[in-house]
Amino acid sequence: MRIAMIGQKRTGSREGGVEVVVGELARRMADLGHQVTCYDRMGEGAPSEPYEKDGYRIVPVKALDIKGLSALTSSFAATRAAIKDGADVIHYHAEGPCVPLRFARSADIRTVATIHGLDWQRAKWGGLASKYIKFGEATAAKCADALIVLSRGNQEYFKEAYGREATLIPNGITPEADLPAKEISERLGLTQGSYVLYLGRIVPEKRPELLVEAYKQVKTDKRLVIAGDSSDTDDYAVALKEAAASDPRALFTGHVEGNLLSELYSNAYCYALPSDVEGLPMSLLEAMSHGAACITSDIPECADVLQGCGLTFPHGDAGALRDVLEGLIADSAQAERLGAMARDRAINGYDWNSVVQRTLALYEGVA
């Protein structure tokens, strides 16, 4: 089967959950003998010509390097290229890139859309961008041959908002061996169990500022490590650093990957994700798979993943987050127990091979 993937920036990179998911799907589907092409946004420092990676093909497509227009223009260019390349199925990822899905249908190409979250709710988007993304959501709901969601909450949303049945296929996780604190010790001065970890994009809807506010009130000598980059949210990232400047325990690492990333997961005392909006957070699954005790907001997209194998607090409540952090930091036995439970749930409950097989079954059903 000739499969096209559209919606990601850099397939297989650590820029975001979509990129990780598409990379895993593409590699594993290629291993099964399918012809997979991923259409990535052409950007600064990225290849400008098609190339092979892990058995699949990556085709860079041009995009306007303007906030809010990059994803829009690249998804149209990618759709044209996928139609020209004769794809059997085009798989769109995220809501905004689904807008040109109609053109694929008019070319008699089957379409599948994965909704990684209700992106129009994300705080970084202005009114016009939010409306455009909502239009992509409606296009996917009304026109896609198959619709995939990552959470029960989103499944219920599409049923209520559009009368559309969506297939629930959560993301998977690739278990990795824990690494000792070597690189993080040399570069960041961190040791095993000496820090609380936030790892994700520095964007308003993930609420890292709430974590900073809460942590200022926590009595501990453990560091607060905030790892990740902004995503069209540079002003917010600057404001976050300014808010944390009065607390010498706060440490911003910027983008991390490779061994540095694995070491941060492996040696964290606990992981915290105070989000207001999520799809299915890959960083939460990764932290769980490394045996980190996890604290998240109580939104269904996080609480359903934890299923009692971690701690939650009412989203948006800095005082409640402070209390949960203080309690867990004071109880290392509980942190160890929750970490072991989280590891078992992530490894046994989120398997990439199952994700791939179920996704391919949808392709075959619509094709």
Image: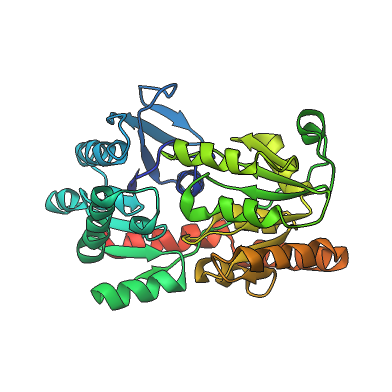
Tell me the quarter of the picture where residue 343 sits.
Answer: bottom right
The residue drawn where x is 48% and y is 32% is 53
Q: Provide residue 52's location: percent of width, then percent of height.
A: 44, 29
Q: Nearer the viewer, residue 316 or 265?
A: 316
Outermost residue, front side: 246
Between 80 and 276, the one nearer to me in the picture: 276
Considering depth in this image, is 149 or 127 the residue closer to the camera?
127
In the displayed structure, 245 sits above or below 279; it is above
Q: Is residue 128 left or right of residue 358?
A: left
Q: Give residue 295's position: percent from left, percent from top.
A: 67, 63
Residue at screen point 37% across, 60% down: 118
* Quadrant occupied by the C terminus: bottom left
Instruction: List the single residue furthest toward the left.
Output: 106
Asked if 106 appears above or below 351 in the picture, the reply is above
Apparent side of residue 265 relative to residue 30 in the rendered image (left or right):
right
Q: Nearer the viewer, residue 269 or 209?
A: 209
Residue 43 spot, x, y in % from top left: 38, 27
Which residue is drawn at the image coordinates 68% and 52% (left, top)?
A: 175
